[in-house]
């Protein structure tokens, strides 16, 4: 699976949009971009995933660049409860290679 | 949405005993389940992948005889930490695959005295 690069930490003001970047320059054509987050002492929570089109759900938006070498997760109105470690993961979905390998992620601090 | 549960959420045991952790997919069938462990201030580390009805595939460096995995049904996988020692104290997290997404359980905190 392709490696990803994320900033180790970011701050965001409560109520503002949080934009979390991820670089995945070695992504291959059949690999998806997934985002998870982990709040302290809990299991990871699935947020969103996409292949090449931008995606939006009730939690966040995912913007993938046209060359697919980077993406941004957007939390439109961050709250204190969004403080967590956010993991960007690139992964294929074929049976043989389906497993999620976690990097260090980005620790997002939402401040009042 | 897809829900994965784990039991127990927290366990304390004496050194040398075995501990079993259960992982269940509550509202879907999971042909593939995964087990991770996480040490304080570190990221999740994949231990093994298990497919229903077959032997688990362990990641390099993970002892299969120490961490026994049984994926007995499409909704249940168990991890048994055999002869646990203090260095096995960790946060163990299971995950289940539904279609093209993995969903994670809440984790089990194991403390070995």
Image (spheres, rainbow, N blue to C red):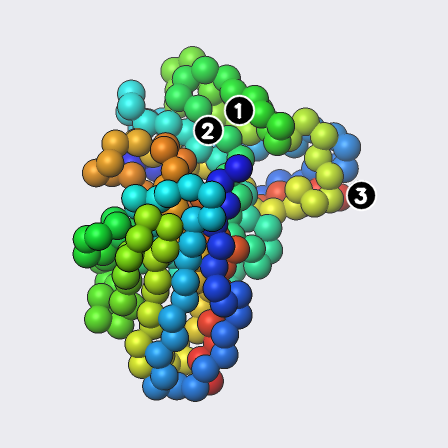
Depicted A14 relative to depicted A30: above or below? below
Whether residue B105 is visible to the viewer of this picture, yes or no, is yes
Please give the name of the residue rendered at 29% of the width and 20% of the height, measured from the top-left corner.
Answer: A29
Instruction: Give the quadrant of residue A86.
Output: top right
Q: Residue at x 50, y 45 (%)?
A: B3
- Residue B75 versus residue A65: which sits nearer the camera? B75
Identify the residue position indicated by label 1 in the image. Answer: A62
The numbered disc on residue A112 is: 3
Query: Disc 2 is attached to a residue of which chain?
Result: A
How many neighbours does mark 3 have within 10 angstroms: few (below 14), some (14-19), or many (20 or more)? few
Residue placed at 55% from the left, 48% from the top? A38
Disc 2 on helix, strand or loop? strand
Question: Going from the N terminus, do you reach mark 1 or mark 3 first?
Answer: 1
Q: Earlier in the sequence, mark 3 or mark 2?
A: 2
Q: Residue furthest left?
A: B55
**In the picture shown, does residue A93 fall above or below A112?**
above
Q: Earlier in the sequence, mark 2 or mark 1?
A: 2
Disc assigned to residue B109: none
Looking at the image, is B65 positioned above or below residue A42?
below
- What percent of the width, then of the height, locates residue B100? 36, 32
Circle nearer the viewer, 1 or 3: 1
Disc marking residue A49: 2
Give the distance between the C-alpha atoms of the residues marked 3 and 2, in whole angstroms: 28 Å
Which quadrant of the rendered structure holds the N terminus of chain A? top left
Chain identity of mark 3: A
Q: Are marks 3 and 2 on the same chain?
A: yes
Judge whether A76 appears above or below B31 on screen: above
Question: Which dot, 3 or 2, sits closer to the camera?
Answer: 2
Tell me if mark 1 has few (under 14), some (14-19) or many (20+) residues whose alpha carbon lies within 10 angstroms of its own. Answer: many
Q: What secondary structure is marked by label 3?
A: loop
Q: Residue furthest top?
A: A66
């Amino acid at each position: 699976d392709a490696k990803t690069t994320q900033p180790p930490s970011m701050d965001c003001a409560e109520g503002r949009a949080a934009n979390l970047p991820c670089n995945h320059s070695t992504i291959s054509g059949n690999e998806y971009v997934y985002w998870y987050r982990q709040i302290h002492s809990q299991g990871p929570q699935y947020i969103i995933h996409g292949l090449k089109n931008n995606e939006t759900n009730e939690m966040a938006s995912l913007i993938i660049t046209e060359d697919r070498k980077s993406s941004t997760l957007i939390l439109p109105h961050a709250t204190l409860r969004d403080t967590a470690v956010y993991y960007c993961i690139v992964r294929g979905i074929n049976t043989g290679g389906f497993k999620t390998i976690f990097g260090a992620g980005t620790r997002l601090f939402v401040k009042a | 949405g897809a829900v994965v549960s784990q039991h127990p959420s927290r366990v304390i045991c004496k050194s040398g005993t075995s501990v079993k952790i259960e992982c269940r997919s509550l509202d879907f069938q999971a042909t593939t389940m995964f087990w991770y462990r996480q040490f304080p201030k570190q990221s999740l580390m994949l231990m093994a992948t298990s497919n229903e009805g077959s032997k688990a595939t362990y990641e390099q460096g993970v002892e299969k005889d120490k961490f026994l995995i049984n994926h007995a049904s499409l909704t249940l996988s168990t991890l048994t930490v055999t002869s646990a020692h203090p260095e096995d104290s960790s946060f163990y997290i299971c995950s289940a695959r539904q279609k093209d997404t993995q969903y994670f359980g809440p984790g089990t905190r194991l403390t070995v005295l």
